[in-house]
Image (cartoon, rainbow, N blue to C red):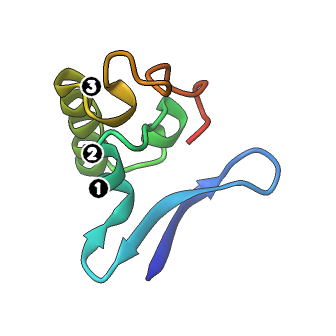
């Protein structure tokens, strides 16, 4: 496992991507609706990565996966910037 740090957030918070071998674990969580990303995180990414993350979140939301599931206790995503 490795972590690619994109930038430092508020306090001691690091903003980055988590990798397991060649798999972007952060992206996999977003694709399954188990995580979201905020504009502050997207702004720290390259255009190609930003596009993949934004598209994955939109698709998970449209499909009602994970936190986007209608009626799910976690259907209200956390506040912007809380990943």
- From mark 1 to mark 3, how far is it between C-alphas? 14 Å
- From mark 2 to mark 1, how far is it between C-alphas? 6 Å
Q: Identify which residue is drawn at 49% across, 33% down.
A: 38
Seen in the picture, residue 21 relative to 32 is either above or below; the reply is below
Seen in the picture, residue 28 relative to 77 is either above or below; the reply is below
Q: Position of residue 82 (x, y in %)?
A: 61, 36
Q: Quadrant of the C terminus?
A: top right
Q: Position of residue 3 (x, y in %)?
A: 50, 73
Q: Identify which residue is drawn at 23% across, 49% down.
A: 48
Q: Nearer the viewer, residue 31 or 2?
A: 31
Label pair 2/1, CB-CB below 8 angstroms: yes
Q: What residue is shown with label 1? A: 28
Q: Nearer the viewer, residue 36 or 64?
A: 64
Q: What residue is shown with label 3? A: 61
Sequence-earlier tag: 1 or 3: 1
Secondary structure of residue under mark 3? helix
Q: Please give left or right for residue 18 compared with residue 54 in the image.
A: right
Q: What residue is shown with label 2? A: 32
Q: Identify which residue is drawn at 49% across, 24% down.
A: 73
């Amino acid at each position: 496992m490795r972590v690619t740090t994109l930038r430092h957030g508020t306090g001691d918070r690091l903003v980055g991507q988590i990798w397991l071998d060649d798999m972007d674990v952060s992206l996999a969580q977003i694709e399954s609706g188990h995580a979201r990303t905020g504009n502050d995180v997207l702004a720290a990414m390259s255009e190609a990565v930003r596009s993949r993350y934004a598209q994955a979140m939109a698709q998970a939301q449209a499909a009602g996966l994970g936190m986007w599931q209608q009626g799910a206790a976690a259907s209200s995503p956390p506040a912007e910037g809380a990943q």
